[in-house]
Image (spheres, grey):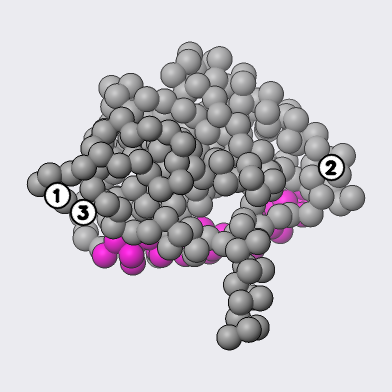
Amino acid sequence: MPRRGAFVVIEGLDRSGKSTQASNLIQRLDDAQIPSKLIKFPDRSTPIGKLIDSYLRSETEVDDHAIHLLFSANRWELASSIVKDLEAGITVLCDRYAFSGIAFSASKVAPSDAPKPVVAEGSSIAPTHQTAPPLLPYSWCRSPDVSLPAPDLTVFLDILPEIASKRAGYGNERYENQEHQERVRELFSRISEEVEAEGVGRWVVLDGGLELKEVEEAIWREVREAVREGVEGELGGVKRLWDKDREGAMLEALYI
């Protein structure tokens, strides 16, 4: 089996500690002399990323469909370089990835004077709030990211939205409000179930409300194992997200 770098993603709600843990992790990988690279999504340095940055800061308005496709395009901009790095033996660490794009877009709802309580489509978690119907269908939000490189390990830092809202800097960007974050958390649960059912990569949930060092050590244990699997050839080639969807679409096209 080919040896390669591990593809690791850290996900979570806003202010769950992702960026802090990603920075700490890349330093530990460097200290351990493990070739590694950190990518933060959205990558706000690219032309597309600059437009996304302006949108997130509420400086510009963009149609919900259009901004979702821009987020996905921002990931596709780096998809080929991620694969090249992995195949060259470099461990790639992403602070957010496609899962955030799906969760944050599919959790948007239209303004309503009398919202009704509903359960997020496909979710096993009971709602903790009232919500209107989604603006963007879940399946539509997922489709642009089909066939992106699939992470070998996704670490989800779980934290209650009300706890995250008390952390420094909360509320500075568009999606940082408690009601939206609650819906996002429910969607992440659905995504994790699908990733596990697909059998491509591992999804690990850690308590993001624990002490900083405790969370760091838990992440390091998981990442160290993924790196070992890559070095010893146990990861195999780079997988693709939801490849079954792509195969199904190709077969369907043959019979149209």
Between circles 1 and 2, the one closer to the viewer is: 1
Q: Is residue 32 above or below residue 243?
A: above
Q: Is residue 205 above or below residue 95?
A: above
Helix, strand or loop under label 2: loop
Any magenta on residue 68?
Answer: yes
In the figure, 141 relative to 251: above or below? above
- Pointer 1: what residue? 112
User: How much space separates mark 2 and mark 3, taking CA atoms?
Assistant: 45 Å
- Residue 204: give x, y in percent of width and height: 60, 31
User: Which range is magenta?
Assistant: 63-89
State yes or no: discs 3 and 1 in contact (Cβ < 8 Å). yes
Compute the Cα span from label 3 to label 1: 6 Å
Residue 245's spot in the image, x, y percent? 60, 63
Amino acid residing under circle 1: Ser
Mark 3: which amino acid? Answer: Ala
| Helix, strand or loop: magenta stretch | helix
For discs 2 and 3, the disc positioned in front in the rendered view: 3
Dot 1 falls on a residue whose secondary structure is loop
Q: Which mark is residue 110?
A: 3
Q: Quadrant of the C terminus?
A: bottom right
Q: Residue at x 54, y 15 (%)?
A: 213
Is residue 171 left or right of 10 when viewed as pictured?
left
Inspect this view and state whether residue 29 appears: yes
Q: Secondary structure at mark 3?
A: loop
Residue 217 location, quadrant? top right
Task: Please report whichever mark, 2 or 3, sits nearer to the chain's N-terminal start.
Answer: 3
Residue 234: which numbered mark, if any? 2
For residue 74, the mark is none
Q: Is residue 153 magenta?
A: no
Give the residue type that dot 2 points to: Glu
Q: Residue at x 61, y 57 (%)?
A: 242
